[in-house]
Image: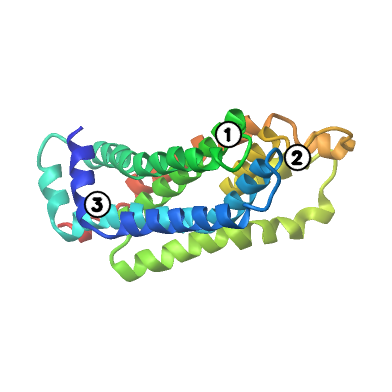
Amino acid sequence: MHYIWKEWKENIRGKGLWLSLSIIVLISISILFRSSVLSFDKGFYVLLINLFDTIIYFIPILCLFIGAFSIFQEKEQKTLIMLLTKKDNFSTFFVKKSLGLYTVVLVPLLAWFFLYLLLLKFNFQLDMKGYSIFVVAITCLAVVFLQMGAAIGSFSRSRMQIIGYTIFVWFYFFFLHDFILLSFLPDVTHENVKLFSSAYFLNPLQAVRMFLETGMGVYSFGHMSRLLQAFMWTKPVFFLLGNLAFWLMVSYSTAILFNRKEGYE
């Protein structure tokens, strides 16, 4: 609780969290206005997909920066060494700091999407299951990239390094990951398609997108080819949960193993 309160006080005085939330709010309202011409009964799903396709470009990089600078600020202001002189070691500090980050970022984000649901009620026929799936997808996306950002902040020596690492991670998941897999696409067979599928869904953007689109009924698994059936060898929710667990563990391990003590010694 101490870390959550500390994180909240630091972010409420800063501009990063409020700027990020303002961007999400403006994008959401803009999509709502653009979707006002859609039908009352079907426009709800179109709006959510369009909103997701837009904010998916912003939430990852915003969460990466928030997580990275939050950890780096502890080293820069020499507060980390003060915390580590008490009973906490770095691994315990990192877990508590991560929980604080989740709370501070997700509570305002979820509060906005609750308010946004009230706005949608006046324009569209609501589907609470579909909206819940949308909110879960956004939450998982934010958690994964917050944790990656925290790992970046733990081993970066300067703000310029944070910017460089963050842009690289964002660029990798949006472009490089799929581009690399495309080069292996001609070699995909029934024997190795599950391995290819696992690599494909290691990209959190793809795992979240598939979970959202199948959960809302936009993408159907009916009449699939044998190869596509083998590609989707488990349910999208399990791909998402596996992706979430994998990247949280990788980010935590990376932060612990490559933590730069020079920043706070």
Does dot 3 land on a helix, a strand or a loop? Answer: helix
Classify 10 Å Cα crowding around label 1: few (below 14), some (14-19), many (20 and above).
Answer: some
Question: Horizontal and vertical percent for residue 142?
Answer: 45, 45
Q: Name the residue type under label 1.
A: Ile
Question: Horizontal and vertical percent for residue 88?
Answer: 17, 36
* Mark 1 or mark 2: whose residue is earlier in sequence: 1
Q: Residue furthest front?
A: 122
* Mark 1 or mark 3: whose residue is earlier in sequence: 3
Decide which of 221, 84 is in the foreground and name it.
Answer: 221
Residue at position x 84%, y 55% in the image = 186
Q: Quadrant of residue 102?
A: top left
Q: Name the residue type under label 2.
A: Tyr
Decide which of 40, 30 is in the foreground and name it.
Answer: 40
**Are the two marked residues, 1 and 2, in contact with CB atoms closer than 8 angstroms?**
no
Give how far apart the Cα atoms at labels 1 and 3 are: 28 Å
Horizontally, residue 91 falls left or right of residue 79, namely right
Give how far apart the Cα atoms at labels 2 and 3 are: 39 Å
Classify 10 Å Cα crowding around label 3: few (below 14), some (14-19), many (20 and above).
Answer: some
Which residue lies under the disc numbered 1?
A: 133
Q: Which mark is residue 219?
A: 2
